[in-house]
Image (spheres, rainbow, N blue to C red):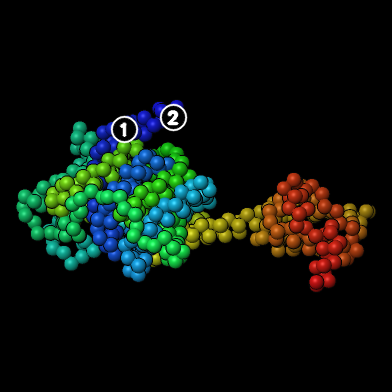
Amino acid sequence: MLLHSTKADWLGNLRGDILAGLVVALALIPEAIAFSIIAGVDPKVGLYASFCIAVIIAFVGGRPGMISAATGAMALLMVTLVKEHGLQYLLAATLLTGVIQIVMGYLQLGSLMSFVSRSVITGFVNALAILIFMAQLPELTNVTWQVYAMTAAGLAIIYLFPHLPKIGKSIPSPLICILSLTAFSIAVGLDIRTVGDMGELPDTLPIFLWPDVPLTWETLQIILPYSAALAVVGLLESLMTATIVDGLTDTHSDKNRECKGQGIANVGSGLLGGMAGCAMIGQSVINVKSGGRGRLSTLVAGSVLLILVVFLNDWVARIPMAALVAVMIMVSIGTFDWQSIRNLKKYPLSTNVVMISTVVVVVWTHNLAFGVFVGVLLASLFFANKVSHFMYVETTLDESRSLRTYRVHGQVFFNSTAKFLDHFDFKEAVERIVIDLNRAHFWDISAVHALDTAVIKFRREGAIVELIGLNEATETIVDRFGIHDKPEEIERVLGGH
């Protein structure tokens, strides 16, 4: 079974994976250079990182067909560290980032993705699509008309080539776009911006090196805050991207293995002179849409990237940026969930608020973690509010026995305790009170405190109170934290000492 799945991951889609890997390798080059510039380091740091992370994650990642490399979200977090302490401390921080992510993987933190609602994922996807498009705008401002013409031609090739009979479906259209526009640019001698204009490409293979920093407590204090932030943001983006690729390919991935895999890849990157990275939604979408499904596509992308920039750098430097901009605009359009716009009319207001808030925060801060945190927080608050509305209390009075029965239905927790207490009439003159909890569940300390409050208030009025129907979980938490049947606790609380 294991051998069969491994064979399928690597050899189940040979042609599609190889061709998709070629497209991704070409698209990775300007991104890696751009992210290096953002972080304030030499372009080779981003390129080596992209090669190293892609190759390692192909073997140890939990999501076949997903592309990991140097990313903008991670680069933004490195700026201050590089500016204040230099490249060597960045490499040390990258190593520590990997170690933290490996630990998070062993702690099974990948399962926390189950707390991220669909509306947060949709907002995350839409925000990334907007950021990907915005990242192309510098290449389209203050440029000659030839750049616009080339970009338009690139988009035309990308969207029309698949409709050609026979070859349209066999070769990824982004690859045709890049190759044809590069050939045309060279043949005509167009004076437009190329990959070579973004920075000097490396001409040597990466070498193993240990960061040249003192192994002291002071060094740890410097890099730990950055490493912790990089680890969290990296895993968030990777796990969200894995979830999106799961949906695109209708397959399942191992999120905890992905956490460990990202960590191992970052350790490897740091030891080969690269910066920390994570999964890239844009490149992953390019990979999937170009036919990539298995681990081979990720391995090809990383390996070909290194071959291109080290051995074919003269040719790669001549690729017009307009061709790559066209590919990234295609990614942006394909990534955005256009159905979510139509769904605004039919989805609940709370769902729309969560989605839009996630988009706004991510685009405003350019920090994916902030957007996801805000989205998850809002989704949790809306959920808690919604669940609290399903809690209600029925009541009956047996006058002959001077008995009032309260039947509690639903979930009692911090957001429904006030509503729970409002259902009781503490001034009613009855001898006995029965609180039936057969159809209720108490979740937290706030719920137990509310129950204590109700019981103690009834007893103050002289009524005998009986609790019935507690399920096992409710009985456990009430026995542990409740005080209504513990006279010494009541005396301590009421006595004020």
Task: Give the residue number, with chain letter if any, for mark 2.
Answer: 2
Residue 255 at x, y percent in the picture = 46, 44
Residue 141 at x, y percent in the picture = 20, 65
Q: CA distance from mark 2 to mark 1?
A: 17 Å
Residue 443 at x, y percent in the picture = 68, 53
- How many C-alpha atoms fall within 10 Å of the one at disc 2: few (<14), some, or many (≥20)? few
Task: Give the residue number, with chain letter if any, for mark 1.
Answer: 13
User: Circle 2 sits in a helix, a strand or a loop, which is it?
Assistant: helix
Query: In the shown orientation, is residue 85 left or right of residue 160?
Result: right
Q: Where does the C terminus fall, quadrant-wise? A: bottom right
Query: In the shown orientation, is residue 85 left or right of residue 456?
Result: left
Q: Is residue 12 visible?
A: yes
| Pair 2/1: label in front | 2
Q: Amino acid at mark 2?
A: Leu
User: Circle 1 sits in a helix, a strand or a loop, which is it?
Assistant: loop
Residue furthest to the left in view is: 188
State the residue at coordinates (85%, 53%): 466
Query: In the shown orientation, is residue 325 left or right of residue 444?
Result: left
Q: Which quadrant of the figure has residue 357?
A: bottom left
Q: Which quadrant of the figure has residue 496?
A: bottom right
State the residue at coordinates (28%, 62%): 41
- Nearest the camera: 84 or 138? 84
Residue 450 at x, y percent in the picture = 74, 61
- CB within 8 Å, label 2 to label 1: no
